Amino acid sequence: MKIHQHLRHLCPLIATLVVPSISHAQNVRPAPNGIEYPQGLTNWRVIGTSIRNDNNTQRVILGNSIAIKAARAKTDKLHWPEGAILAKLVWKNETLATWKAATVPGDFMHAEIMVRDTKKYSATKGWGYARWTGLDLKPHGQNSSFVETCANCHKAAQNTAFVFTQPARLP
Amino acid sequence: MKIHQHLRHLCPLIATLVVPSISHAQNVRPAPNGIEYPQGLTNWRVIGTSIRNDNNTQRVILGNSIAIKAARAKTDKLHWPEGAILAKLVWKNETLATWKAATVPGDFMHAEIMVRDTKKYSATKGWGYARWTGLDLKPHGQNSSFVETCANCHKAAQNTAFVFTQPARLP
């Protein structure tokens, strides 16, 4: 009880941020390259959104606390520090029944992350990649060579540290 | 120091969720109907995303802890309880320079919320509406009658408790 009072006193944010039963992902196996699914990923804060018109999907981009701090820093020079993790939750597009001009998330496709560790992942430009498919979060890839596809695609974003996402402007 | 240890012990989530300087909105004036801008709104968790093809915008839908608990409940019957707040952050669409088939957030348009209070907002079907425009979050509406436009539009969603957003499927 005393500790609860401390909690309330110290961090009024806690009451609004910590809610029981907020994530259902459990016992998720790591990706073939050993990267673990971050528990509580769906509770992370927003960096941006994106629609891919080439494959009829939409996504929200979230970040762990290190990534959020970097993404929301008031600076002209975006820098993703060691330990930053960006996550994408991806859905197939669907038309909203109550507003036909709106395209909303349909089937859940996958969760994917990129982890900043310039030493550990030097072979893939300082980012470790992982993906889990479907609501049951099945690890993507037969073996660790799946990251070649990720890294090859991300070469298109070489001028932005191999990150496609540019943080959305936030008030 | 002791309290910090308690914090770490009790809630490992805290370290990942509470970060300083995560919101820049300060001194935001209330909407003309008295609804206050929720401080820390941009730190709320995700309910879904949406693209409106009729006005070239995309948005992320967030919720306060009451709304998140409702949105993520494993039930067939979605129920928005008293105190639930849904928030939309809305951007103009922009093409991503590094992936031309991707549509990403451009200029920030507005933040808007709907607050569940069936008594207080009985005239607008139990939801209180408010919007703040631009990165400086200028309250929308000359006077409190602006909510008529909101409520009229939301009539299209009368079969889903006047809420357009259906929570995205999450792992």
Image: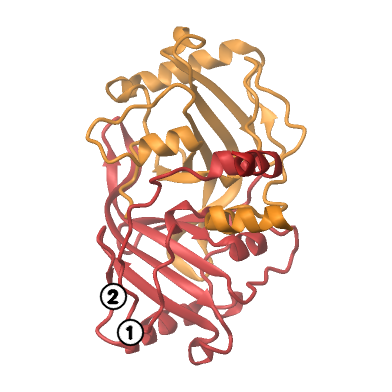
Chain colours: A red, B orange
Q: Which residue is mark 2?
A: A140
Where, quadrant-wise, is the C terminus of chain B in this rendering?
bottom left
Are the two marked residues, 1 and 2, in contact with CB atoms closer than 8 angstroms? yes
First in sequence: mark 1 or mark 2? 2
Place of residue A6 in the rendered image (x, y in percent of width and height, measured from the top left): 67, 43
Classed neighbour count for the residue bearing mark 1: other residues with Cα under 10 Å, few (<14), some (14–19), many (≥20):
some
B124 displayed left or right of A100:
right
**The residue tagged with tag 1: helix, strand or loop?**
helix
Q: Of the residues shown, which amino acid type is indicated by label 2?
A: His
Quick one: SS at disc 2?
A: loop
Residue B33, x across and y down, in percent: 62, 14
Q: Which residue is mark 1?
A: A146
Seen in the picture, residue B26 relative to A23 is either above or below; the reply is: above
Specify the subunit that label 1 lies on.
A
Q: Are marks 1 and 2 on the same chain?
A: yes
Is residue B43 visible in this depiction of the protein?
Answer: yes
Picture coordinates of residue A85, whole percent (x, y): 53, 69
